[in-house]
Image (tube, rainbow, N blue to C red):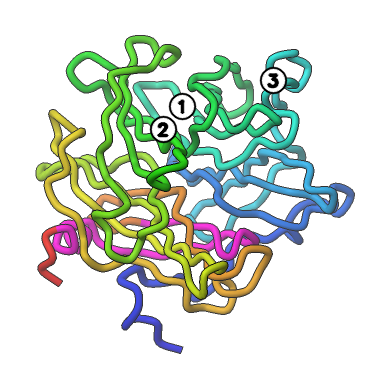
Amino acid sequence: MNYSNASFVRRYKGNPILTGKDFPDEYHILHCFNSGVIRFRGKYLMLNRLEDSALKPYFWIADSEDGYDFTPREKPIQMPEEDPRFQKYASINYYDPRITQIGETYYIMHACHSEYDCRLSLLKTTDFEDFEWLGFVSDPGNRNGILFPEKINGLYARFDRPMTSWDGGNIWISFSPDLIHWGQSECALKNTAVRWAWAKVGGGCAPIKTPEGWLNLFHGVRTQCKSHYVYQSGVCLHDLNDPTRVIAVSEKPILTPMADYELHGQTPSVCFITGAVVEDDGEVKVYYGGADTVMCAGTIQVQTLLDLCHNRL
C-alpha cells in the first residue's frame, strides 16, 4: 500500500524492525517502542524502551551494521534501582530514553514516573557498557527532555515538555551550566501553532544542526472522536543562536499513522519519533515507535525537512 499521500517519511519496507519477540524469552517482553538511536563507533546503536508482561520497564541496547537489522545484547542495562532516590521517584516506570552526544560523552535523558508525577532523569556513558546516573534534572510534571548536541551561548540546552492543566502541552527550552540545574525556561512551540496537534506537542529526538537552524522533529497529538488520540510527527526550525525563536513550522505532518503496525497495538494510531541519524549524503534515518508496541524506521532528506518547514512542499 502507498502511504505517500499522508507521510513524507518513507517507511522501511521491513517494518517493524524490532518487537518484544526479538528479546530473550525468559524476560517475557511484550512491547519495544520509543527507543533512542545514535551512531556509535561506526555502527548504529538503539537503546530500547521495553515492557514485560507485568509492565516492568527495561532499557536494553541493540546494535546494527546497517541501521535496520538490530541485534539485542544479552541483558538489559543496569539501572540505579538500588538508589533510594531512584526507587522513590521511578517507582512506577522509567521510559522514553533520548540519546545525545556532546563531545566524547553520550547522555541519555529519560522520564521517570511515580506517585509524585513525572520527572526527568539523566544517565551518561562513554562506551554504552558502564553508565553513571547523574540524578533527577527537573521538577515534577515534566517529560520529553532532549539535550542539544552542543552548548549554546555557553550553556547546555534542552527541549522539554512541562504538563500544565490549562494549555495542554507545549515544547519549552531550558538552559543549564552543568546539566543538573536548569532554568531560564521559555516556551518555544505552542500546540496551538500546529493545526493538526491541538492537544499537545513534544520533542522527538536530538535537534539536527543545519546552516539554516536547528531542525526539531516533534510529535503532535490531536483528539479523534473525543477519547481517541492520534500521534503524528512534524518538524520545525529554530534559530541557531537563539533556539527559543522558531523560524518556521511545517503546516503538514511528516509522518501520520497509516500502516497496520502504527494503527493497531496497545495505543492505537501512534507514530512517535525518538531517534534520527543523519547520513553523509543528507539522508536522515528516522526511528519511531508504532502504536506503543514496536520499533519502526524510515528515511527522509534533510533538504525535504527544511522545505517542509518553509512550506515549499
Q: Mark 1 = which residue?
A: 106
Q: Secondary structure at mark 2?
A: strand
Q: Residues within 10 Å of mark 2 (few under 14, many from 20)?
A: many
Question: Magenta region: which residues?
Answer: 285-309
**Viewer-closest of 1 and 14:** 1
Tell me how far mark 3 sits from mark 1, CA to CA.
20 Å
Q: Secondary structure at mark 3?
A: helix
Q: Mark 3 = which residue?
A: 86
Tell me which corner region of the image, top left, top right, bottom left or bottom right, holds residue 86: top right
- Give the mark nearer the N terminus: 2 vs 1: 2
State whether residue 203 appears in this view.
no
Q: Where in the figure is residue 266, as x and y percent of width and height? A: 68, 64
Whether label 3 touches label 1, CB < 8 Å: no
Q: Residues within 10 Å of mark 3 (few under 14, many from 20)?
A: some
**Viewer-closest of 302 and 84:** 84
Q: Mark 2 = which residue?
A: 100
